[in-house]
Amino acid sequence: MSSTNTVASAILQLQVISQDISIALGFILLISGTIGNWKHNASSLYIFVKSLFDLFVLIIGVTNQITRLGFNIDLTAQSRVWCKLAISLINITFLNSLTFSVFSFLTYRNLQTLTTQDRHSLSTLTRQVISLALLQVITLLVFQVPYAIVQIYTLVTINLAKSTYRQAQEQVVIYFFHGYVYGTFTCSFYCYCIVSKRFRKEVFGVLTRFLSPPRTTQVQPRHQRTTQL
């Protein structure tokens, strides 16, 4: 009897951990991704458009995940507009990421065909865009591949008999990677900081102006200056 209570308590704790992971990881991704995608300028129009799509999928996808997995409130079931908007935007954004990956791969293949002299003739801006594209491919692999592995495991073992405790353990992992995969859409800003020295200077300049208190100049009244004279 005591062992049954222990297992039930452990399952309950795992369920609570799953909800906490969904809430905490969701808010971290939502805040960091929103800040990261809020850019006034970009190295190319395509990357700027991708940042807008990333921002949309973070606001809609992560918000829905926080409410659904963390608070058991499914916004897509309560609002048809939200459901259609979420599905269409997320699908478009994943296609956008796939297109970006293909574009980056073709760019890399094109670089391999260039001679050393041609590579030296590339402008700094072009090099930064190429480096950013390749770095985006790496982030896609880092965040998307583990999620794909978890999804494959779930489909393969869907017909297996599992204990309640094992299901609770798998739920923790699934909830974590449901949030982890959205890291793909939070990395644009940080990739810019790694690749572009000029962008880092602009970020530091904005932070300095934001954190430093404004200077106030005191102007003496005219009659006081006349009296001093």
Image: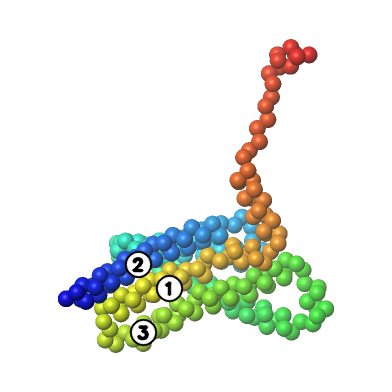
Q: Identify the element where label 3 is drawn.
A: helix
Q: Is residue 101 left or right of residue 4?
A: right
Mark 1: which amino acid?
A: Phe
**Separation (CA) of disc 3 from disc 1:** 15 Å
Mark 3: which amino acid?
A: Leu
Quadrant of the rendered structure where residue 47 is? bottom right
Name the mark on residue 155: 3
Please name which of the two marks, 3 or 1, marks the residue nearer to the observer.
1
Q: Where residue 166 sits: x, y (%)?
A: 30, 80
Farthest residue in the front direction?
2
Q: Is residue 71 left or right of residue 41?
A: left
Q: Identify the element where label 2 is drawn.
A: helix
**Which residue bears the numbered disc 2?**
17
Q: Where residue 225 sits: x, y (%)?
A: 74, 16
Sequence-first disc among 2 and 3: 2
Please name which of the two marks, 1 or 2, marks the residue nearer to the observer.
2
